Image (cartoon, grey):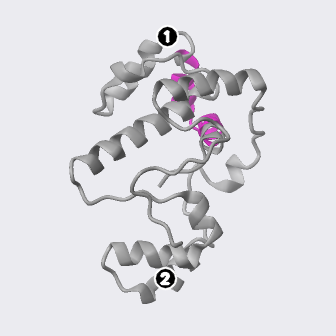
Amino acid sequence: MYRDIEKVTKSVHRSSLVCPSVHIIFKVGRLSGQVTKIMLNSMGLNGSDYCERAYELVPGVLLSAVTTATYLDALRRGINIRALRYEDLIARPLNMCRVVLEFCHLPVSLAEQAVKAFEVDSQRNSILAKSLIGHFKEPEMTPQKRAELNELLKKYKMPLIGEPEIIEGTLTCS
């Protein structure tokens, strides 16, 4: 699943504020891109491709770039995998649940139950609960930040902030 890049960057930033280890990594990552490289290498990814200083909103861009590149690589290698846009799921939950269930060869009759699951915060008992993260102010997307992030997005061949983002192989209900 993927979502609008600007929302990802802000969400990752807010999430880092409640997770001390991630917050420290992001703070240290401002000093050197090597921190980002080491962190991604420890996750089994090639950190050399994403060696960037991780200030404020950059981690969200890097997260999107890494996950999108990994997905597209799997898709191009013939793995039967598909993307799902968060915005589509929120706009048309019942229809999108039917599409996902059909893709997974599961009974489409389960779609209504699947939609009911969205009524509960799946992170409600964790530090990532909406009730905790919702108290943090989103960082402002200034024109300068947007320009810097768009340069990074261009480098990783990702859609720019504000552009429609439809990744190859995305499930749709249209």
Relative to 79, residue 17 above or below: above
**Along the polypeptide, which appears first: circle 1 or circle 2?**
1
Looking at the picture, tell me which residue is in the foreground, 99 or 127: 99
Is residue 140 visible to the viewer in this orientation of the structure?
A: yes
Image coords of residue 3 (percent x, y): 56, 50
Q: Is residue 89 magenta?
A: no
Residue holding disc 1: 32
Circle 2 — which element?
Answer: helix
> Is 29 positioned to the left or the right of 69 in the image?
right
Q: Residue at x 41, y 51 (%)?
A: 168
Disc 1 to disc 2: CB gap under 8 Å: no
> Is 80 positioned to the left or the right of 98 in the image?
left
Relative to 125, residue 164 above or below: above
Looking at the picture, tell me which residue is in the foreground, 76 or 5: 76
Q: Residue at x 63, y 29 (%)?
A: 57
Quarter of the rendering containing residue 140? top right
What residue occupies the far bottom of the structure in this picture? 109
Q: Which residues are magenta?
A: 11-28
Distance between mark 1 and mark 2 Cα atoms: 46 Å
Q: Residue at x 61, y 27 (%)?
A: 150
Looking at the picture, tell me which residue is in the foreground, 23 or 157: 157
Q: Which mark is residue 17?
A: none
Q: Residue at x 46, y 14 (%)?
A: 33
Circle 1 — which element?
Answer: loop
> Is 150 positioned to the left or the right of 82 in the image?
right
Q: Residues within 10 Å of mark 1 (few under 14, many from 20)?
A: some
Residue holding disc 2: 111
Image coords of residue 141 (percent x, y): 75, 31
